[in-house]
Image (cartoon, coloured by chain):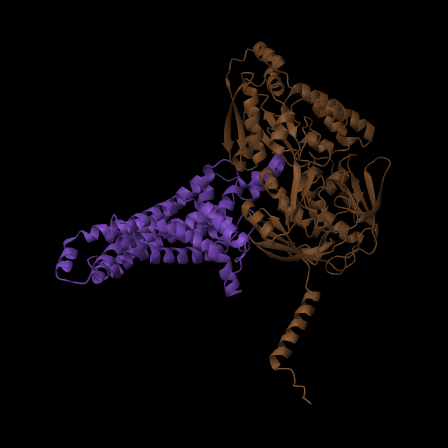
Chain colours: A brown, B purple
Amino acid sequence: MRRRRPLPVWAVGLAALALLAMVGKAGAETLLRARLNADIRSTDPGTNRDANTDGVMAHVVEGLVAFRDDTSIGPMLAESWAVSNDRKTYTFRLRQGVKFHNGASMTADDVVWSLKRWLDPATQWRCLSEFSATGIARIEKIEAPDPLTVAITLDQPTALFLPTLARPDCGQTAIIHHDSVGPDGKWIAPVGTGPFRLGEWKRGQYVDVVKFDGYVSRSEPRTGYTGAKDVKVDRVRFNVIPDSSAAKAGLLSGSLDVIMSLSIPDLEELKTRSDVQLSITPALGLTGILFQTRDPLLKDVRIRRAIALSIDTAQIVEAIMLGTARPNNSALPLGSPFYSEAQSHGYTQNIAEAKKLLAEAGYRGQPIKMITNKRYSFVFDASVLVQAMAQTVGINIELEVMDWAAQLDRYNRGDYQSMAFVYSARLDPSLSFEMLTGPKAAQPRKVWDNPEGQEMLRQSMMIDDVAKRQALFDEMHRRFIADVPMIVLFNGAELTALRKSIKGYAGWLYPEPRFWGVTVE
Amino acid sequence: MLSYLARRLAMTIPTLLLVAVAVFALVRLIPGDPVQVMLGDAADPAQAAQLRAQLGLDQPIPVQFVHWIAKLAAGDFGHSITNDLAVLPLILDRFQVSAVIVLVAVGLAACIAVPAGLLAAWKQNSLLDLSVVGGATLLLSIPSFWLGLLLLLLFGLKLKWLPVIGYVPFAENFWQAATFIVLPIATLTMVEIGVLTRMARAASIEVLRLEYVTHARAKGVPEWRVLARHVLPNAFAPTWTLIGLVLGHLLGGIAVIETVFTLPGLGRLLVDSIFARDYPVVQGCLLFTAVIYVVVNLVVDLCYPLFDPRVTVA
């Protein structure tokens, strides 16, 4: 009989290693890797910020209310709210059991402290001016009658109070714990209530957000920045990758899971890949051609109208966006609940009419300078196509390509004849018109200087009756189309590429990602 | 030697001052400012004015300049406008990344280019010469971002030998760090080989025509010894000057490589800051690069006698 020999040491070692590896695998954290095209600016939401900062911080902090998928306002940290009869006092009932990232429970005192901090000029909150004399309304009182109730009193009624609180660029007017700042009031790091807490931020390289185990989710389905926020990964790493080719290589090699804000050429290229899936969502941005209505030549509405009639918006949008976006001549974005039948009437190409208008205006081929940029390739493409189409009726447009900061300078000073421009998303229809409407003498960046338009805009900001607001927006649209202060072309689309292993991702009207409800298989 | 060093150092002061004035003026001359970039298409005039006052941008430009210079004299490069970090530590941190890549790449390029140039000159008009010149011209003509992307696609995506994105400092994990910078270094080396080979070849051809080479050959000195002892040291001197120039150039021009390979280096910092109109960082980066340029050229000049004994530093 042969005696069984003991296993050699190396075999025992190997087995142990294998076992360890398996245990290690079972305990390994799930990591979701997304791309940012530039680093975030700070971790202080709604102050030192840009779109990337807003997108990352939306995972970490929350406000009383938030935008839903359809841009209506839903409750977030508030359970509900009531508005007084004079429509000046909002009383919020807070959700019970909400925890901050440091374990403390959220109370009305935290809400009062946070709001007062935002309203302190030293904080430099982006949206402070909205609550100043020239803004939507001034906040007169913030009170906490009991630990779960907060009452805010305004000096005048406004339809924009809740939408402003919810604005992502205002940092959603986040409710944060006072440990977020030091004793000197200086910002340290956000101690918020979001489904993720802030992890490591290596400047220029990446910023991590880590699953917050103490998160108490809402129960209704995920919608916009509210609803259920069920986190299914341990960590999300936002990698800073400025070059889009490098980002694509990262996705295809498997070292990156998600690329947001794809360009159209990138989208076309990734379409054919079997290991990649695409998410295409209508977005709220607005691309169009602005005219300086105080320019000696372009102050003649017939010339502006002739340009509008010389172009075929649908053809331009198809050529640039390759089916990912639809044409829209209205200041209200497609997808807005206020986009009605009235808004669908825009400019229809009419070469004969355009030529007639030009002849009436006495236009004899004088050059019209159009500023454009290559930072947003679709803006540049749009300007080239508009130039070509206008040429067919004899309009002589000369393009002037600038870097974005230089173009913004000209835009803010109103120092241009015409420019191809892109506006960032506005979530409320009044705000969509507000970015275009105003007196040029006081605000040179405004394109539509029409006193009646301004009065209707003011009313739309005060009234919160939906039907009345709708009527105002319809009338403003009709006048806007007649005045042709600009030609709105399209709203664009939010294009995201994901590896096939990512499930549960959904884009929405606001062009920022949401990584709750998302799994990595 | 010491007096030469002192004189050279003294001469750098007006140079750097001129650079400072030029940098400051140029940066302010570009339209747009950090406030506009920050506020984007929703720049409320009151808010913009407040922000501008806070950043000191509402002061007259000469006043801003004096403030900046006064702070610089105390070694304070100021604070970044976009992320409120001190500029000098930010630059030094990013500089490490760029410096490693540039130094290694230029060193490698010199090691390959100088012998290649020498051989091509020695066998002038032969097939070898033709291929060296052809290869160098090809490398010179390829845009560095395109070459970088090709390498990235080949080694990162197709072969999967190297990671495609990311960066780890050497202090953290040496081998991992190495895998991240192999491709950037390879790209830069290939680009620089082109320039340096042609320079080394031209210098060698000139030396090969000199009488002492003919004399050495006539004496019966073996050919390899002629090349190694007589031609190489004399041909290396002009190439060495060029290496100095290339080093200085690259610190400014490495931005493309850093962008393609997502490296947090000085070049990318500079480009990002220009687009954001982050004045203190742009000024700091340019001034810092100027200092590096001056220092590199000084070191090159000081090392010159080592390669060419006819030159003395005094």
Give left or right: position of B3 versus A503: left
User: Which one is nearer the viewer's eye here, A365 or A320?
Assistant: A320
- Image quadrant in which you'd find residue A236: bottom right
Residue B129 appears at what percent x and percent y? Answer: 28, 50
- The image position of residue A441, as x and y in percent, is 60, 25
Residue situated furthest right in the rendering: A85
In the image, farthest residue toward the front? A1
Q: Position of residue A336 (x, y in %)?
A: 74, 33
Give the side of residue B113 with respect to residue B288, left or right.
left
Q: In the displayed orientation, state which residue is furthest to the bottom.
A: A1
On screen, residue A4 versus residue B79, left or right, reads: right
Horizontal side of residue A229 vs B291, given as left or right: right
Residue A477 vs A216, above or below: the answer is: above
Point out the image quarter for the C terminus of chain A.
bottom right
Rendering quarter of residue A267: top right
Residue positioned 58% across, 38% down in the render: A265
In the image shown, does A356 or B35 lie closer to the viewer?
A356
Report x, y in % for residue B302: 28, 58
Above/below status of B119 relative to A467:
below
Residue in the picture at 64% in, 16% down: A350
Can residue A454 be seen? yes
State whether residue A45 is above or below residue B163.
Answer: above
Total labels drawn: 0
Locate the N terminus of chain A and report the quarter of the image it occupies: bottom right
* Residue at the (40%, 51%) spot, across then down: B190
Q: Residue at x 52, y 58 (%)?
A: B161
Q: Nearer the viewer, residue A56 or B295?
A: A56
| Residue B75, visible in the rendered structure | no
